[in-house]
Amino acid sequence: MNLVDVGKLAIITLTPTLLGAAVVFGPRVCSAVARVWTDRTPHDPEPLGPPIEQLAADLRRLLRLHDHLTRSAHLAMRAHRLWAVEAAIGTRAVETARALGVAHPEPERPGDLTRVELAALLRSLTAAGLVLPESIGHFTSDGRL
């Protein structure tokens, strides 16, 4: 047996192993290369949350729902629904304040603002230029911002 025959035997023996390794480890190697490639390319800035238009629309809708519930719901059902709507208003108000750069309290849990904090935050948002419904239920003494 000469050196060429030994080389052929080595290629024939190693080919199935190398093909199996390529099938098993190929996707991992490709994803690692793609990760490194994307980390090195500059990215355009991405928004941290939903667009401000969507936040404002959601906040207006929730405030109208809150006003409607305070005026119409039966007393037994009103408390639970109002609590849920106020929590949603608080969450959206904090997200909107972040998006607009308005100073706001940072609750430990989402929607965990008191009515006084929520009213102050809503007033700050309107002072920053956000258009909200004129009547927002019992968040302010006169029902207006």
Image (tube, rainbow, N blue to C red):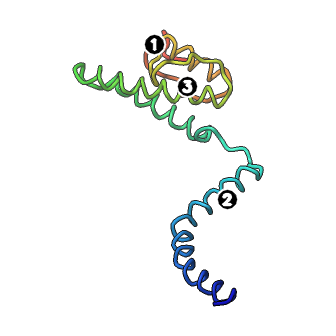
Q: Which mark is residue 114?
A: 1
On the image, the x and y values in percent for residue 18 come to 57, 73
Residue 65 lies in quadrant: top left
Residue 57 lies in quadrant: top right
Q: Earlier in the sequence, mark 3 or mark 2?
A: 2
Q: Which SS class for mark 3?
A: helix
Cα gap from disc 2 to disc 1, whole angstroms: 50 Å
Cα gap from disc 3 to disc 1, whole angstroms: 13 Å
Q: Residues within 10 Å of mark 3 (few under 14, many from 20)?
A: many
Q: Earlier in the sequence, mark 3 or mark 1?
A: 3
Query: The residue under label 3 is which amino acid type?
Result: Val
Q: Residue furthest front?
A: 1
Q: Which residue is mark 3?
A: 94
Query: The residue under label 1 is which amino acid type?
Result: Thr
Q: Which SS class for mark 1?
A: loop
Placement of the N terminus among the 4 image quadrants: bottom right
The residue sitting at 52% across, 13% down in the picture is: 117
Can you tell which of label 3 and label 2 is closer to the viewer?
2
Q: Which residue is mark 2?
A: 33
Placement of the C terminus among the 4 image quadrants: top right
Cα gap from disc 3 to disc 2, whole angstroms: 39 Å
